[in-house]
């Protein structure tokens, strides 16, 4: 029922063909998946195409012509989903299908444990498989129909070699004894929070707000929260509702009339439409005279002042350790990971799993005085036993 093209893929553009594909994929032990989507002017991603590869070949699913919720059967099945740089694609799948893969491996993460630094799919295919794929056209409108042959060929190339790439990377990781490391990292990625952000924290993402204090900060926080909520409700980018400059301008001036609002820098006509403008003025009125809020994550304890000098030093050692192990530093430990361990946060990444043995335990010994860091010109930082 699929439209067969002569370029190595099937184009699925009706529900009958899609259900047939889903039934076939449900029996596959492994499959590759990718998406094409747009979110330049929307809050949520709008999926246009889903690319899937299995043992039978490549299928391109026209998301504008089928009910993607049927794919839930595959995503929640036992098959392993192979993806590349999967974070945004999982957000797309969750919104379109109501779920994400129950089992996932990300080839970008696999490559990170082999020494690559956030490599593109094109880079990996070139270096690992000697395969060159078409270059992406950033101006492509994936929501426009019909899609041209060049666009479809590019989309197909995103998954055509993914299963073979995964197999090759997995073999190398197995030789190095790092399969468990990759599995843990992929599960962390799979289970991290996604979707709409907490509107109450919207102000923390506006750089200019950091300079405000007192009542102005309280107003800015309320306006930023309102902007985020409006963006979610209308599926528009927050800055389309009101620019960052507009948020700060409103907070500094605290207008009481539409005319005053209209005179502020960063305010555009589309933000002053009747109810829209009145809502904004109401938010300003309600926030006046209130005290600023703390970020919702402010319950996290501060790092003790005596430990703050240790962070850059330990970070330097972690970077060197990652280089010695030939893996991307962020996969070993981020600055946030280090601070969480130093604060004694329960469940800190460096206190559990493979990272505990590689860096967590050595850091614990440093803190307890059982070990110290020394410097050797030839080998760099060295962990010295003090017992």
Image: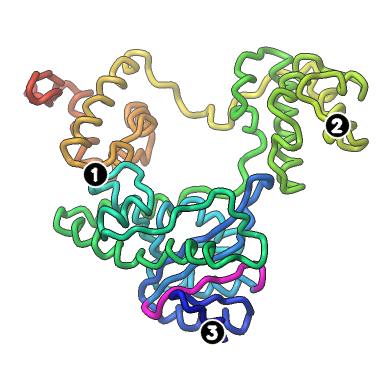
Q: Residue at x 41, y 60 (%)?
A: 83
Q: Residues within 10 Å of mark 2 (few under 14, many from 20)?
A: few
Q: Secondary structure at mark 1?
A: loop
Q: Which mark is residue 269?
A: 2
Residue 228's quadrant in the figure?
top right
Name the quadrant containing residue 166. Answer: bottom left
The CA distance from mark 2 to mark 3 is: 50 Å
Q: How far across and down, in percent of the image, does residue 203 sit?
A: 64, 28
x, y percent for residue 284? 82, 24
Q: Provide the residue designation for mark 3.
A: 20
Q: Is residue 234 above or below residue 367?
A: below
- Of the residues under marks 1 and 2, which one precedes in the sequence? 1
The reply to whether callout 2 and callout 3 are in contact (CB within 8 Å) is no
Magenta range is 55-65
Image position of 260 (left or right of 210):
right
Above or below, 208 relative to 182: above
Tell me the residue that label 1 is attached to.
115
Q: Secondary structure at mark 2?
A: helix
Q: Quadrant of the C terminus?
A: top left
């Amino acid at each position: 029922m699929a439209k067969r093209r002569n370029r190595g893929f099937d184009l699925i553009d009706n529900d009958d063909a899609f259900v047939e594909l889903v039934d076939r994929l449900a029996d596959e032990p492994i499959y590759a998946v990718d998406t094409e989507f747009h979110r330049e002017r929307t809050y949520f991603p709008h999926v246009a195409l889903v690319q899937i590869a299995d043992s039978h070949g490549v299928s391109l699913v026209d998301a504008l012509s089928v009910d993607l919720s049927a794919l839930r059967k595959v995503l929640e099945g036992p098959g392993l989903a192979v993806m590349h740089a999967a974070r945004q694609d999982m957000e797309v799948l969750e919104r379109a299908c109501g779920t994400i893969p129950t089992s996932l491996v990300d080839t970008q993460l696999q490559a990170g444990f082999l020494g690559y630094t956030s490599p593109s799919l094109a880079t990996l295919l070139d270096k690992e498989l000697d395969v060159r794929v078409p270059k992406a056209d950033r101006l492509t409108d994936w929501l426009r129909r019909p899609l041209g042959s060049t666009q479809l060929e590019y989309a197909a190339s995103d998954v055509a070699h993914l299963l073979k790439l995964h197999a090759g990377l997995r073999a190398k990781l197995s030789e190095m004894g790092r399969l468990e490391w990759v599995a843990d990292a992929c599960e962390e990625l799979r289970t991290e929070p996604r979707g709409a952000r907490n509107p109450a924290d919207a102000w923390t993402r506006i750089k200019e707000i950091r300079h405000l204090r007192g009542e102005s900060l309280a107003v800015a926080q309320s306006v930023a929260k309102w902007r985020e909520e409006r963006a979610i409700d209308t599926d528009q980018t927050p800055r389309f509702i009101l620019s960052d400059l507009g948020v700060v301008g409103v907070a500094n001036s605290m207008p009481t009339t539409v005319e005053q609002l209209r005179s502020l820098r960063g305010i555009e006509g589309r933000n002053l439409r009747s109810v829209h403008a009145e809502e904004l003025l109401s938010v300003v009125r309600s926030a006046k005279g209130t005290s600023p809020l703390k970020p919702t994550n402010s319950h996290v304890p501060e790092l003790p002042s005596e430990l703050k000098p240790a962070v850059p030093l330990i970070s330097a050692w972690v970077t060197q350790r990652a280089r010695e192990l030939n893996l991307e530093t962020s996969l070993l430990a981020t600055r946030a990971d280090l601070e969480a361990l130093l604060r004694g946060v329960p469940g800190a990444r460096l206190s559990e799993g493979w990272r505990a043995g590689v860096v967590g335990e050595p850091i614990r010994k440093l803190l307890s005085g059982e070990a110290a860091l020394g410097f050797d010109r030839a080998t760099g930082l060295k962990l010295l036993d003090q017992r």
